[in-house]
Image (spheres, helix red, strand yellow):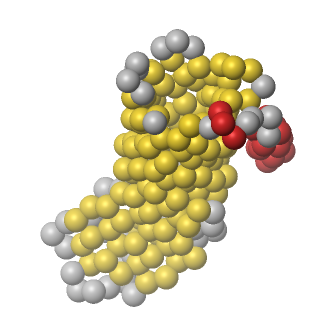
């Protein structure tokens, strides 16, 4: 799997190098994701956040590669999920960076590629000021994406991400709570974007 991801990354970069600067277009995007594992292992029933849950927003750059109907998409996003309860607040944040190859038809676009999630970090704080935190290593994953392309530059899509967060640095003052040091963050997401 690791060699597959590395090979795909090399292919993406090689293909994108054929594009001219004048062919670039930029856009903005947002999405809502669902899925993944529970981050809290035991100690409370308060948490509802799963490691794939998120609201994301970011920017992207499109550039044609090799063929007129194929283009590379590079995106950087901020993805977050937070909840407030009677006795606690929790959040899970990360920064996804995507490298995709997309094929476009008149009304649709389909693609696949890699995503790197930088600084995945989970924290829960209780009303008595005890807390627990898990800082995971940056993670590399695979992405599948499909979009309905509208004539006014708006894109509506569905996205699947396969990714795992591992080797968490766990700290905290709540002695009853335990967090998972490895979680599956794979999810499905509904997306919307606009290309300028």
> Residue sitting at 46 percent across and 36 percent down?
196
Residue sitting at 74 percent across and 35 percent down?
A: 19
Return the x and y of residue 126 as percentages of the image width and height.
26, 78
Q: Quadrant of residue 177?
A: bottom left
Left or right: 173, with 115 as reference point = left
- The reply to whether residue 38 is visible in this rendering is no
* On screen, residue 182 above or below 60: below
Q: Residue furthest front?
A: 22
Look at 27% across and 70% down and name the residue there: 89
Q: Position of residue 41 (x, y in %)?
A: 44, 64
Q: Estimate the x, y position of residue 80 in percent, counting from the top left.
A: 40, 58
x then y, percent, for residue 8: 78, 39
Horizontal relation, residue 16 to residue 35: left or right: right
Q: Quadrant of residue 5?
A: top right
Q: Is residue 8 left or right of residue 34?
A: right
> Is the residue 172 above or below the residue 155 in the image?
below
Who is closer to the viewer here, 177 or 147?
A: 147
Vertical comparison of 48 with 86: above or below: above
């Amino acid at each position: 799997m690791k060699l597959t991801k590395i090979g795909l990354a090399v292919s993406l970069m090689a293909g994108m190098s054929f594009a001219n600067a004048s062919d670039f277009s930029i856009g903005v995007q947002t999405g809502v994701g669902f899925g993944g594992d529970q981050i809290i292992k035991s100690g409370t029933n308060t948490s509802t956040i799963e490691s794939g849950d998120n609201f994301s927003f970011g920017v992207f750059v499109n550039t044609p590669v090799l063929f007129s109907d194929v283009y590379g998409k590079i995106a950087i996003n901020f993805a977050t999920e937070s909840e407030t309860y009677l006795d606690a607040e929790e959040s899970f944040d990360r920064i996804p960076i995507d490298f995709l190859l997309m094929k476009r038809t008149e009304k649709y676009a389909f693609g696949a590629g890699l995503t790197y999630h930088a600084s995945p970090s989970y924290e829960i704080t209780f009303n008595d000021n005890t807390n627990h935190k898990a800082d995971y290593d940056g993670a590399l994953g695979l992405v599948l994406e499909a979009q309905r392309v509208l004539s006014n530059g708006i894109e509506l899509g569905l996205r699947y991400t396969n990714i795992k967060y591992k080797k968490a640095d766990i700290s905290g003052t709540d002695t009853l709570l335990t967090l998972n040091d490895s979680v599956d963050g794979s999810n499905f997401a509904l997306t919307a974007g606009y290309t300028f």
